[in-house]
Image: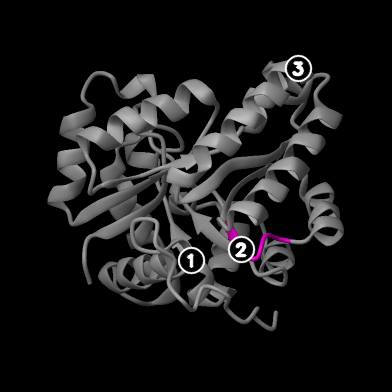
């Protein structure tokens, strides 16, 4: 299989302004050669575009209004940014990150604004025929209510950095969403996520680094390099009694089926939902 895929990272993040090229080259030396980004807001979209010009075969664009960004901006600025998002989307492989983050230090007074912008972005993804990249934290029930009210976009999508139990995984899988697992799976004590990874259908699994965040244990306290995708694959391989290469091959094939190769959707993206 061609270069393996990191389904979610932030290589345009300013924290990578020093050492970005070396980190990407190190990942590529391990066979990891494509990196779908996660969108935060307008400044980040511009940084992604600049990065893709430098690495046109390695960087996949993903634009959205992250719950963090929504929480930090008022309703008028969110509406302006949403209009800008609609204009930018034709060059993206996916819409995201979008979703809900109801941790008190993030949410503050933004709960209703987050819900409104999430619903509007789901509508945009449907109109643009793009999969979604979802950031859902401490908002599981609310997200499920929104999916059941509005529907999941027909191109489906991923719950990025899934880090929860098998019953919660089933809630998303039943709605046709895939689960992207990152560095937290490498924690020995993360038994709920380990069980979910053991139980879930492999055709709905993707893997990610969320670089520069969420490093596996051996990078604790450091920027998480994109090459740590190998650590994620090793951890999942142990849980599934497979090899890391098998996990990387399967999750890369899943990525291309869901997101298409460099923005061109495969014909079989509308998969049957698993019986969970």
Where is the C terminus found, in terms of image quarters? bottom right
Q: Viewer-proximal residue, 236 or 115?
A: 115
For mark 2, does the 10 Å Cα neighbourhood hold few (<14), some (14 to 19), or many (20 or more) residues?
Answer: many
Write the residue at 49% across / 67% down: 205
| Magenta span contains residue 44 | no
Write the residue at 63% across / 59% down: 192
Q: Earlier in the sequence, mark 1 or mark 3?
A: 3
For mark 1, does the 10 Å Cα neighbourhood hold few (<14), some (14 to 19), or many (20 or more) residues?
Answer: many
For mark 3, does the 10 Å Cα neighbourhood hold few (<14), some (14 to 19), or many (20 or more) residues?
Answer: few
Residue contact at pointers 1 and 3, CB within 8 angstroms: no
Give the residues in magenta: 152-158
- Secondary structure under tag 3 reads helix
Q: Earlier in the sequence, mark 2 or mark 1?
A: 2
Write the residue at 68% across / 17% down: 72
| Colour basis | one colour
Left/right of residue 88 with respect to residue 147 in the rendered view? left
Q: Earlier in the sequence, mark 3 or mark 2?
A: 3
Q: Determine the CA span between mark 1 and mark 3.
A: 33 Å
Left/right of residue 179 with respect to residue 57 in the rendered view? right
Write the residue at 16% across / 32% down: 22
Q: Determine the CA span between mark 3 and mark 2.
A: 29 Å
Where residue 2 appears, as percent x and y from the top left, is 21, 66
**Residue linked to disc 2:** 156
Is residue 40 visible in the rendered image? The answer is yes
259 vs 176: above or below: above
**Residue linked to disc 1:** 258
227 vs 238: above or below: above
Is residue 138 visible in the rendered image? The answer is no
**Residue linked to disc 3:** 76
Residue contact at pointers 2 and 1, CB within 8 angstroms: yes
137 vs 79: above or below: below
Viewer-nearest of discs 1 and 3 = 3
């Amino acid at each position: 299989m061609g270069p393996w895929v990191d389904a979610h990272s932030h290589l345009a993040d300013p924290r990578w302004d020093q050492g970005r090229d070396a980190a990407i080259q190190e990942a590529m030396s391990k066979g990891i050669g494509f990196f779908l980004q996660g969108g935060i807001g307008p400044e980040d979209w511009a940084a992604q575009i600049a990065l893709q010009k430098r690495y046109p075969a390695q960087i996949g664009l993903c634009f959205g209004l992250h719950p963090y960004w929504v929480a930090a901006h008022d309703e008028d600025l969110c509406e302006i940014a949403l209009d800008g998002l609609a204009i930018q989307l034709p060059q993206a492989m996916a819409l995201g990150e979008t979703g809900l983050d109801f941790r008190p230090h993030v949410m503050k007074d933004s709960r209703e604004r987050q819900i409104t912008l999430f619903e509007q972005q789901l509508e945009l993804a449907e109109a643009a025929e793009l999969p979604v990249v979802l950031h859902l934290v401490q908002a599981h029930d609310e997200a499920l209510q929104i999916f059941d009210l509005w529907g999941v976009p027909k191109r489906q999508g991923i719950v990025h950095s899934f880090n929860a139990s098998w019953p919660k995984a089933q809630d998303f899988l039943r709605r046709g969403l895939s689960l992207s697992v990152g560095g937290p799976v490498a924690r020995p004590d993360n038994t709920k996520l380990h069980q979910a990874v053991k139980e879930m259908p492999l055709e709905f699994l993707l893997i990610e680094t969320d670089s520069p965040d969420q490093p596996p244990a051996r990078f604790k306290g450091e920027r998480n390099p994109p090459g740590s995708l190998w650590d994620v694959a090793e951890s999942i391989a142990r849980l599934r009694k497979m090899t890391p290469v098998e996990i990387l091959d399967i999750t890369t094939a899943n990525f291309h089926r869901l997101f298409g190769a460099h923005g061109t959707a495969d014909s079989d993206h509308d998969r049957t939902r698993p019986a969970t």
